[in-house]
Amino acid sequence: MPKCGVLVVKDPPGGLHPKVPSVLEMNILSKCYQELFGQFCQSLFEAPLLSQAPTAFVHAFQHCQQAETQSVPTLGRVKVRGRRAWRIPGGTTTLVSATCSAQYAGGTVLFEPAESGLPSGLLVSPSLVKVVYGTASIPVVNVGTTNILLSAYTLQSVHVVSLPSGVEEVQPVTATIIAQAAQVGGSVVQEQIEAIELPLLASAEQEQARALLRRYHTVFSAHDGDLGCTNLLSHDIPLLDNVPVRQRYCRIPLLESQVIRESCSPYASPIVLVRKKNGTLWLCVDYRQLNSKTRRDAFPLPRIEESLDALTGASWFSTLDLASSYNQVPVT
């Protein structure tokens, strides 16, 4: 328990009867409950850690839960996360990270803005938001044309209430479809790994190579629609100004493949499909208007001699690439 000490008292002279238990006050047990509830949330009493604990501790935690439930306020508060101010560009919607009470962790809450307290030009609409480790992303809209700073503690009087009765969170159906597709794709990759021929390697080396491929089979693309997305980096486009570029979209069915997603961003550039010489489709985005206001980066090209020197002493060489990096690198 952080910032909490436990005082251990020596036995009195003459000792104690062996059946006399040690005493832990409820202030200690309530802190234990809060720490464990922050880790396990509603599944706390199903966790093996608690199911193997003495009955007295289980009863004490149940008492803490009842007291917590009875004392939970209908209204909570959130504040801007961190000490630095958030810059909200003009004419845009920005997701501002805000902290709230740990009792809402892992749940969905109804965010209701306060009647006053926000800088002029900023609007926050009521919305259902997910609380992850005490942090919620609040959509803040700048209806003006100039940047506005949202300082820390500005959202101090905003209310957070629990999910209203009659409102349930429905899990998207696509999650199940993606899981099934992943299972099918995984079996296809496993079959391809077993069927691969490695005639230049000895039998033991062939098995080692297949074992390595099996270990990382999830990174291989099973088919053209199995794109995935890298979490190692994201592509950022620095602009000369913050005036949004918005163009009319084209009707292209890419939502199901998760190449695109629904968005309320003020920026919009249309997707264009171009037919390659081999008959396959090439996905492009009409970024001409965005390119016209993009700040160019200037950097030297790497020297070939330095690249070759980096390979000195190596015996094995391999090339790894994303199957379709244009569709697999997220854009900031």
Image (tube, grey):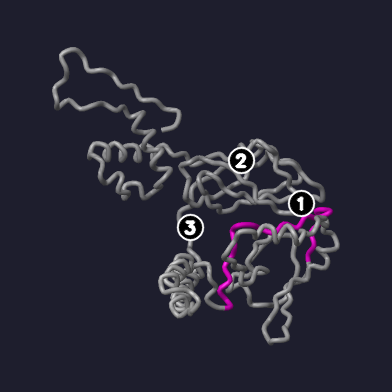
Which residue is at 68% across, 39% downward?
116
Which numbered tag is attached to residue 230? none
- What residue would you read off at disc 1? 143
* Range covered by the magenta-colored residues: 224-246
Q: Main secondary structure of the magenta part?
A: loop
**Mark 2, secondary structure of its residue:** loop
Quadrant of image for the C terminus: bottom right
**Mark 3, secondary structure of its residue:** loop
Which residue is at 44% across, 39% downward?
72
Foreground disc of the pair 1, 3: 1
Callout 2: few (<14), some (14-19), or many (20+) C-alpha neighbours within 10 Å? many
Callout 1: few (<14), some (14-19), or many (20+) C-alpha neighbours within 10 Å? some
Q: In this view, does 326 lie to the left or right of 314?
A: right
User: Mark 1 vs mark 3: which is more N-terminal?
Assistant: 1
Is residue 180 visible to us here? no
Q: Distance between the residues labelled 3 and 2?
A: 28 Å
- What residue would you read off at disc 3? 167
